[in-house]
Image (cartoon, rainbow, N blue to C red):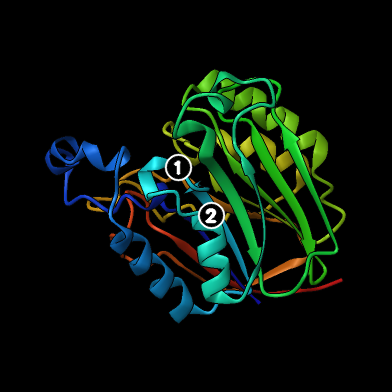
Amino acid sequence: MRFLVYNIAYGTGGPEGDYERLWKIHRYIKTSRSHLDRIIEFIGKNSPDIIGLVEVDTGSYRTNFVNQVELIASNLDHYQQSSIKYGRRSLGRAVPIMKKQANAILTKKEVTDSKFHFFPRGVKRLVIEVETEGVHIFLVHLALRKKIRAEQLLFLADIVNPDKPTIVAGDFNTFSGPGELDDFCEKLKLVNPNRNYSTYPSWAPNWQLDHVLCSKHIKIKKFTVPKVKFSDHLPIIMDFTISK
């Protein structure tokens, strides 16, 4: 199977550098559909079975009220599970544009189970869990503050069952390096193949923020970080098989 995880920055495009990012910051308020079209084309060409999307817009003013999750799923003929990434009582669910900011998991085949968990702390709290084709997928977007990330990882360790074929993936915001994940991976006996792959920023990657963590049942066949600038993050693509 092929798994792809990508922080698509709400389809606002990939700047060429920090300066361009600043003077084109208006794209976070109103963006062109062309950025998303390029992302859809890229994903389609790679034919993933399972897709984890971080930072997707479910139909705000920014995208001219286009639900990016539904559009991507429709174009790729995938099923989708998505939710707003803020806590159920968060102010973020009431603020225009923010209340449409979500994460999503898309699957080629129907899911056999799905759940939405929420971290007890942090601004971005959503954890999506799905089971499809015999593998459990957890999609996360961790906090910007290191202390909060550590607390979120403790919560995550309590809901992940490493005795089943499992992938925990997403934007972990590990600005202090992938070592932030060592205790979490050791406790759950997860493998982190991302050690030498920086994913942010896309124009000059020097931070390993995006990760795919795998239980012992996941046999990694190929792991790549395509150098495409459709977002401020780079995507990760992993081919794998499942051993019981």
Residue at which label 1 appears = 60
Instruction: Give residue 42's position: percent from left, percent from top.
Output: 39, 73
Q: Could you tell me the amino acid type at mark 1? A: Ser
User: Does residue 119 appear left or right of residue 123 in this picture?
Assistant: right
Instruction: Give residue 167's position: percent from left, percent from top.
Output: 69, 56
- Circle 2 packing at 10 Å, graded few (<14), some (14-19), many (20+), is many
Instruction: Give residue 122's position: percent from left, percent from top.
Output: 59, 22
Which is closer to the viewer, label 1 or label 2?
A: 1
Q: Nearer the viewer, residue 25 or 176?
A: 25
Q: Quadrant of the N terminus?
A: bottom right
Relative to 11, residue 242 above or below? below
Relative to 90, residue 168 above or below? below
Q: Nearer the viewer, residue 174 or 114?
A: 114
Q: CA distance from mark 1 to mark 2?
A: 17 Å
Q: Could you tell me the amino acid type at mark 2? A: Leu
User: Does residue 25 appear left or right of residue 93 in this picture?
Assistant: left
Q: State the residue at coordinates (16%, 46%).
A: 17
Using the rendered view, name the quadrant where residue 155 is placed.
top right
The kind of secondary structure element at disc 1 is loop
Residue at which label 2 appears = 53
Q: State the residue at coordinates (81%, 38%).
A: 159
User: Does residue 23 appear left or right of residue 88 in this picture?
Assistant: left
Instruction: Give residue 60's position: percent from left, percent from top.
Output: 45, 42
Q: Quadrant of the C terminus?
A: bottom right
Q: State the residue at coordinates (55%, 34%).
A: 142
Q: Earlier in the sequence, mark 1 or mark 2?
A: 2
Using the rendered view, name the quadrant where residue 21 is placed.
top left
Q: State the residue at coordinates (58%, 67%).
A: 73
